[in-house]
Image (tube, grey):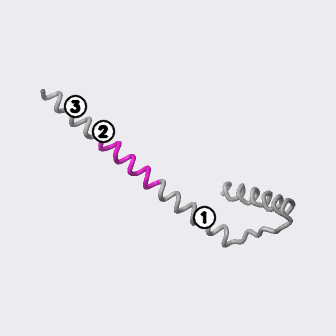
Amino acid sequence: MQICVDMQTRVQLLTDRYRTEMRRYYYVTPTSYLILIKTFSSLLDKKRQSIGKIIAKYEKGLEQLGKAQVAVGEL
């Protein structure tokens, strides 16, 4: 929730700056926020999948090391 408040504050400051420098208005609508949230959610899902794959590789590597340790112990 704090992120949304921070975004709103930053957008407000940037739109004021844009209006001052460019003499044009920029409107942020509820649809803009919905698109932002959807994009953030999509990026978060992709990152979670990526991290999940990395964790799976790490766990598989640990499993292989465990098997190697047992094999060496038997030798």
The residue to which callout 1 is attached is 37
User: Mark 3 or 1 closer to N-term?
Assistant: 1
Under tag 3, what secondary structure?
helix
Using the numbered discs, state the Cα–Cα distance from disc 3 to disc 1 in whole angstroms: 47 Å
Magenta stretch secondary structure, dominant:
helix
Count the marks.
3
* Magenta span: 48-62
Name the disc covering residue 62, or none: 2
Check whether the beta carbons of the residues at disc 2 and disc 1 lie within 8 A of each other. Answer: no
The amino acid beneath tag 2 is Leu
Q: Position of residue 9 (x, y in %)?
A: 76, 57
The residue to which callout 3 is attached is 69
The residue lying at 68 percent from left, 59 percent from top is 4
Q: Nearer the viewer, residue 14 or 41?
A: 14
Quarter holding the C terminus is top left
Under tag 2, what secondary structure?
helix
Q: In the picture provided, is 35 more to the left or to the right than 5?
A: left
User: Mark 3 or 2 closer to N-term?
Assistant: 2
Q: Position of residue 43 (x, y in %)?
A: 53, 58
Using the numbered discs, state the Cα–Cα distance from disc 3 to disc 2 in whole angstroms: 10 Å
